[in-house]
Amino acid sequence: MPVPEIQILVCVNDRGEESSRASCGQRGGLALYQRLKDLTRELGLRDRVLVTRTGCLRHCSRGATVVVWPAQHWYGGVAPGDAGELLEAALEGRFVERLRMPPGPWE
């Protein structure tokens, strides 16, 4: 089995509608995960890119949160429509500046 060059972590944590705190699941995290998985498959990148859904990445108010490894590129407010741009940037080793996670405390 090939070892992927890139791992894309997508938070899909959902606190539920009754929670007073935001969560990535409520902000489209699962749909984003599915779109990235579909794109990776469609583009024949499954040996190079591993898309993984995660629990909380501790930036809930900035979700949906995505981390690209090993580059350690952190993104916030990512939507399913951003998947293609994010995947292309990951393959090129660059940031998508408009989605870059702003500095701030962990939540």
Image (spheres, grey):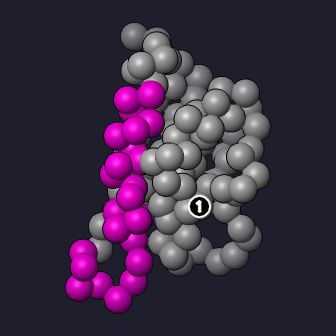
Determine whether, in the image, residue 11 is placed left or right of residue 74.
left
Q: Residue 87, percent across and down?
A: 58, 33
Split into 4 quadrants, where in the image is the N terminus?
Answer: top left
Check disc 1 and report the residue beneath it: 76
Q: Residue 71, percent across and down?
A: 69, 39
Magenta-colored stretch includes residue 25:
yes
Q: Residue 46, percent across and down?
A: 44, 19
Label 1 environment density (alpha carbons within 10 Å; few <14, some 14–19, many ≥20): many
31 vs 40: above or below: below
Q: Is 2 in front, or is 10?
A: 10
5 vs 35: above or below: above
Magenta-colored stretch includes residue 77:
no
- What amino acid is at disc 1? Gly
Residue 6: which quarter of the image? top right
The prevailing secondary structure element of the residues shown in magenta is helix
Magenta span of residues: 16-39
The residue positioned 39% from the left and 44% from the top of the image is 33
Determine whether, in the image, residue 91 is placed left or right of residue 53.
right
The residue positioned 49% from the left and 54% from the top of the image is 79
Q: Residue 66, percent across and down?
A: 53, 51
